[in-house]
Image (cartoon, rainbow, N blue to C red):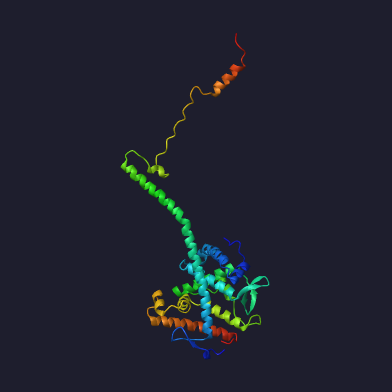
Amino acid sequence: MNTTENKEYIYGDEERIDALDHLIFHEIGQQAQWAQTMKMWEERARQQRRHRLLPVLSNVASVAALFVLGLIVEAMVPGIKIADSLVDSPSAPAVEQTPVQPAPSSAVTPDTAVIGIVDSTASPQP
Amino acid sequence: MQIVNWTDEQMVAAVLRRDNLLLERYYHDCKAYFLHHAAAVFVTEAHIDDIFQEALVHLWREIESHRIEMHEGRVCRWAEGQLLPMQSSLLTFLMAIAKRKHWELLRKQQRMLLTDNDRMLEVLDSDRYAEPTDAISERDQRERIVADVVLGMSPRCRQILTLFYYEHRTLDDILALRPENQTKQGLKTSKYKCMQRLREQIRERFHQLHLNP
């Protein structure tokens, strides 16, 4: 094919296009299509990541808002402690353990149980 | 880190079928692998996303234009005028393309020279167009050469020519998108030179193989 004889005018008036150019344009188009497709995949993946992240951010924002609300209430009402209980802060005072109260005397204890066994097996006293 | 559940054969088949669902998954798996190894391969992290996409487009166009294809159950590449089994996996090949693109970018930016003793580059350089055989038609041979030369053009030329010939943007539009070009005349000259370079390289390859232009 003689390329100089098969020229035509397209894409503006300053350039001549021949059969080889058409091959080049086709190839440029094919490669551009792949690039566009990949950009679309990238965008889709970005959106999916955003959708996954949104509920997490929403939860964090809710906790932060509650914390701030707690601080405001604390400032307004003296003696009340709200904000510390919302976060697990290392500076927060340790919760005191309430000592276990001894069982009431009426409850059965190992000692009384043993005594009870001894009593039940002992022969009746005259 | 390995890309599991994918074989080179599956990838070749998916590209030829244009199975976008499968290819999208492959794309993300492949990118994860690529980013994992990027620090060891690249000097700078700039343009890594662009390099990855260009490299993958390069690989998939090679498959689409049958420069890489399955032959007798093996992945082969057109080299030395015939289809030869590939010495590396497609993933290694992809990394080699990316590395070459990276070095080309650096060379342009920092005037650095390509290292000839790089094994990754040898993978690419092993592909040569020699005398055509009867295995493929002259038309296919021409298309492969065009694909190869267009794949090898610079990012700057790719952007200008894609915007103008594929997206049909006007020179004024392109000028707005590319602040590197100062004037419309300068842009027009750049576009002309890019096209001329492509034509010359392709014709030279045609001439080497005694193909009609």
Q: Is residue B121 something that shows in the picture?
A: no
The residue that appears at 39% across and 49% down in the rendered structure is A64
Observer-nearest of B202 and B15: B15
Residue under the image location 52 percent in, 90 percent down:
A4
* Viewer-side residue, B104 vs B31: B31
Task: Indicate whether B32 appears above or below B206.
Answer: above
Classify A115 as above or below B131: above
Q: Is residue B205 above or below residue B2?
A: below
| Picture residue at 36% right of the left edge, 44% below the top | A70
Q: Position of residue A107 (x, y in %)?
A: 51, 24
Total count of labels: 0
The quarter in which the N terminus of chain A is drawn is bottom right
Decide if residue B47 is on the left or right side of residue B139. Answer: left
Looking at the rendering, in which quadrant would you find the C terminus of chain A? top right
Q: Residue furthest top?
A: A126
Horizontal and vertical percent position of residue A11: 46, 83
